[in-house]
Image: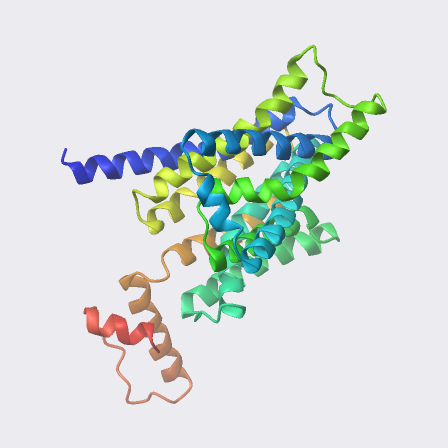
């Protein structure tokens, strides 16, 4: 195995570690089921901040934080990120401990598609044919659940929207994972600390200096949050984003399995149909720029033209899959 292959194997291994860790994280939050979601969130913020600051101190990366907070634009961006990720964390913890993990998994499945929607509408990136089809499939999946249950799947949508906008802001300012987490948690740590102190003074806090299992789990929330980010950062430096984009679906798939088989949450025929639309959307989205899909798009367009009477003389001979033709299709 040459050096390049070793780097690839290491990158895939780090990515698998990160997404498996994110996938099984509901098991961790379930151990804290007796603790209110808001209190878990407060401890997650505080101990994440403590752990990440410790890591940055060990590696002498204080300068990274100074650079991150050097401009007003960056400070505003990190404040927005801190609010979005805090809302996302709270919603996910609440979903797990209120037996709604299946719906939470649904939210993380459609998150990449919502990010694509934001890229098109806000960043003015161009939507290709198959990406449009993927969005229609995803919207259909959400609509099926909403109509059948008579209500909007709020948990899924809050997780999707909060994480989508979080990713958008991060893309616009570009920080590495650990520095970003340190500054994001720094903004909300004072509020989280005040809340924890208030609970402790009222005698209803779950943290004890006897360091029982609940206390240790609350403290460990920082490690449970930060370690997958460290692994993800290592993966991102070694493998292509396209590889990561396939592996990312491992996390909600594991969580979905945990919700159905371990937590015994209901998974009806309606859920199955809705998820089928989402999975089809993800498959189409992931393959949208392959030569086969671009060729198929051209065939579909040619066939439609014939049926409309616009292409009576048009040929639907297979499109040549040369690089030149592929580039032409991309820029239609």
**Viewer-closest of 43 and 35:** 43
Residue 28 location, quadrant: top right
User: At 61% from the left edge and 40% from the top edge, which residue is drawn?
Assistant: 186
Location of residue 11 in the rendering, given as x and y in whole percent from the top left corner: 31, 38
**Viewer-closest of 295 and 66:** 66
Left or right: 281, with 329 as reference point: right
The single residue placed furthest to the left in the displayed view is: 2
Q: Is residue 258 visible?
A: no
Left or right: 125, with 181 as reference point: left
Location of residue 32 in the rendering, given as x and y in whole percent from the top left corner: 67, 24
**Viewer-closest of 169 and 252:** 169
The single residue placed furthest to the right in the displayed view is: 202
**How many numbered discs?**
0
Q: Which of the image's four quarters has the N terminus? A: top left
Q: Which of the image's four quarters has the C terminus? A: bottom left
The single residue placed furthest to the top in the displayed view is: 210
Q: Is residue 115 visible?
A: yes
User: At 38% from the left edge and 89% from the top edge, which residue is drawn?
Assistant: 310
User: At 26% from the left edge and 35% from the top edge, which residue is drawn?
Assistant: 9
**Viewer-closest of 161 and 220:** 220
User: At 53% from the left edge and 41% from the top edge, which residue is drawn?
Assistant: 181
Location of residue 296 in the rendering, given as x and y in whole percent from the top left corner: 32, 67
Left or right: 183, with 302 as reference point: right
- How is the rendered protein coloured? rainbow
Location of residue 227 in the rendering, given as x and y in whole percent from the top left corner: 47, 31
| 203 versus 115 height, above or below | above
| 267 versus 79 height, above or below | above
Left or right: 319, with 112 as reference point: left
């Amino acid at each position: 195995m040459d050096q390049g292959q070793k780097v690839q194997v290491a990158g895939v291994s780090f990515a698998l570690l990160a997404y498996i860790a994110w996938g099984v994280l509901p098991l961790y939050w379930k151990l804290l089921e007796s603790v209110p979601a808001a209190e878990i969130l407060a401890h997650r913020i505080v101990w994440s901040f403590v752990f990440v600051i410790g890591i940055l101190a060990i590696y002498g990366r204080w300068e990274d934080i100074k650079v991150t907070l050097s401009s007003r634009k960056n400070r505003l961006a990190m404040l927005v990120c801190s609010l979005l990720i805090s809302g996302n964390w709270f919603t996910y913890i609440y979903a797990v401990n209120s037996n709604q993990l299946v719906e939470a998994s649904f939210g993380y499945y459609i998150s990449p598609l919502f990010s694509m929607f934001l890229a098109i509408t806000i960043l003015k990136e161009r939507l290709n044919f198959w990406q449009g089809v993927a969005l229609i499939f995803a919207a259909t999946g959400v609509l099926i659940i909403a109509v059948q249950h008579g209500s909007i799947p709020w948990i899924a949508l809050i997780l999707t929207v909060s994480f989508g906008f979080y990713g958008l802001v991060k893309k616009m300012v570009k920080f590495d994972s650990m520095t970003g987490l340190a500054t994001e948690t720094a903004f909300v740590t004072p509020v989280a600390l005040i809340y924890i102190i208030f609970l402790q003074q009222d005698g209803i806090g779950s943290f004890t200096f006897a360091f029982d299992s609940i206390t240790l789990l609350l403290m460990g929330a920082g490690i449970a949050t930060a370690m997958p980010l460290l692994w993800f950062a290592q993966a991102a430096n070694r493998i292509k984003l396209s590889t990561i984009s396939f592996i990312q679906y491992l996390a909600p798939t594991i969580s979905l399995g945990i919700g159905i088989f371990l937590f015994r949450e209901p998974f009806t025929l309606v859920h199955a149909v809705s998820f089928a639309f989402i999975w089809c959307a993800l498959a189409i989205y992931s393959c949208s720029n392959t030569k086969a899909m671009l060729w198929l798009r051209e065939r579909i367009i040619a066939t439609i033209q014939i049926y409309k009477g616009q292409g009576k003389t048009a040929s639907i001979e297979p499109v040549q899959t040369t690089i030149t033709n592929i580039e032409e299709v991309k820029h239609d």
